[in-house]
Amino acid sequence: MSRISKYCRVAADSPTTVWKAGLYIRLSREDGDKLESESVSSQKAILERFVSENAEIEPTEFYIDDGFSGTDFDRPAFQRMMTDAASKKINCVIVKDLSRFGRNYVEAGKYLELVFPTFKLRFIAVNDGIDSFAQPSTMNNVIVPFKNIINDEYCRDISVKVRSALDIRRRQGKFIGSFAAYGYKKDEADHNKLIIDDEAAATVRFIYEKFLSGYSIIGVARLLNSRGVPNPSAYKSAKGLNCRRASTCKNGGAWSDATVRRILTSEVYIGNLVQKKNEVISYKIHTAKQVDKQNRIIVKGTHKPIISEQDFNKVQSLLSRDTRTSPAEKEGKLSVFAGFIKCADCGRAMQKRTVKQPNKTYEYYVCSTYRKMHSTLCTKHAIRAEILEEAVLTTLNKYISLAVDFDRLLEKINRANKGGARSKRLTAELVANQKELEKAQKILLDLYPDYKSGIISREQYFALKERYENSVKRAEREISRLKEEMRNFANGVDGSNDFVAKFKKYGGLTALNRDIMIELVENIFVHEGGAVEIHLKCKDAFLAASEYIEQHKPVSAAHSTDIA
């Protein structure tokens, strides 16, 4: 006995001769719908003409999803149409063609093979000649799933091309976001370029300035809220931009610590574009996922910076530290040592405590493990704040004095060495490597003609080619290194002057502040009993300068370079 189509059974079970039709229209640029033939007006005209030619079909309502991808069926008009089908308001669905119905092969098949027959819905795709009632065989034809596969593949191909095109534009340093980052706006002459928004940029500079001066992140947020500064979302809304976030509605445009942190960590403020932070999982699954940092597209110097790179790097260094404000500190301002001082034994941050006595108030630091966990896990490691500050000041002034001495001696050595033996040695090495490069390149040029003429075999050709290509690469590396060394030699001490200069500029240091700590100090470790161990960021540079002096000073330049 031959198999009977389920659509034939639907037709036989249906006593009505009048079909209440839902006319479904879908348009999406994401699917590549750019032609006029796919427009809403064009689809509407085709459906109206079809209904007018079929007296048994009564148009009930148009269901239009304009701007919705066909890769899923979570579309408002489509879902409303299915609700009407369930309530028997309509019993027929008409579309221009299968691609308007959907471009997801699996989901389209589910609706056509299972859902519509269950609801006893007649389905018509006008241009594809499909009609589940008048011609049930058209639904069982292999052409239907085949066309759905083609529609699905078309959408996948468009998705790949769109992603590729967007990545190319990102790598070209073009901004492709809907809204510019807070502090910037899109250039009216070129919407792919960012220009500074002076009003918002002033707030960005204020945030960096206050954080570097010692305020905590939450302290900066409170300061902005106390001054009535609108947060980025509220600011954009006030400027007439359609940018609404849930947080804006909940907190009335107030700043949060998360917003302040996002601004403090964004490279956009030093002139770099960081794009492709998020991407959809696939062309069928529209949920976004976060992209790993190493896979994001970063292009430097695409627009004018609001913050200097030096200040930005200082902020990143501070953010990596464990910094908290004590209850006694007003406005969320951090102490000068916050994030720098640690217990020498357990490695955890030290906590600042304030003790008030009848005659005076003093501050001290204590191990957070001892105070918050249990006294058996670590000892107190207590130290008075003024003693700690005195120790740090003494150490820094010692290195400042060393920096001045080093700078004078390095200048003297460089003057003595200019045009001396080292300069001659570097020049001789450079000439030798340039000759080696020319020789290897000439041999490489001659190898292929020798191979083609049969002078050398194929195996000899590839072996010699690899050998002399490696010689070329080695010579090029050496030439590059020697030129760099000669430039450094002409300018001073191999870059060590940069570090020495950092200490020199703080000559006559009498008090500490956050800026000094950020630039010069790596960590401070407090031992039980009050001994202080100070790790400076530039100590290695001093050692390098010391070694340089020992290696390159003239015989007449005797000097002790012992560093504690």
Image (tube, helix red, strand yellow):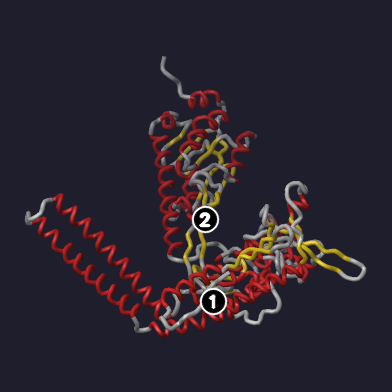
Label 1's element?
Answer: helix
Front in this rendered view, residue 341 or 554: 554
On residue 500, the disc is 1
The crowd level at tag 1 (other Cα within 10 Å; few <14, some 14-19, many 20+) is many
The image shows residue 127 at horizontal and vertical percentages of: 42, 42
* Residue sitting at the far right: 358
- Callout 2: SS: helix
Q: Percent x, y for residue 304? A: 53, 74
Q: Left or right of 274: which side holds 416?
A: left
Q: Quadrant of residue 365?
A: bottom right
Q: Is residue 454 left or right of residue 346?
A: left
The crowding category of the residue bearing disc 2, from other C-alpha atoms within 10 Å (few below 14, some 14 to 19, many at least 20), is: few
In the image, is residue 456 above or below residue 436? Answer: above
Image coords of residue 184 (percent x, y)? 58, 70
Residue drawn at (45%, 54%) of the image: 163
Question: Could you tell me the amino acid type at mark 2?
Answer: Lys
The residue that disc 2 covers is 293
Seen in the picture, residue 306 relative to 162 is either above or below; the reply is below
Q: Say if residue 140 shows up in the picture.
A: yes
Q: Residue at x 39, y 36 (%)?
A: 146
Question: Is residue 313 found left or right of 50 in the rendered image?
Answer: right
Disc 1/disc 2 C-alpha distance (Å): 34 Å
Of discs 1 and 2, which sits in the foreground? 1
Quadrant assignment for the N terminus: top left
**The image quarter in which residue 227 lies:** bottom right
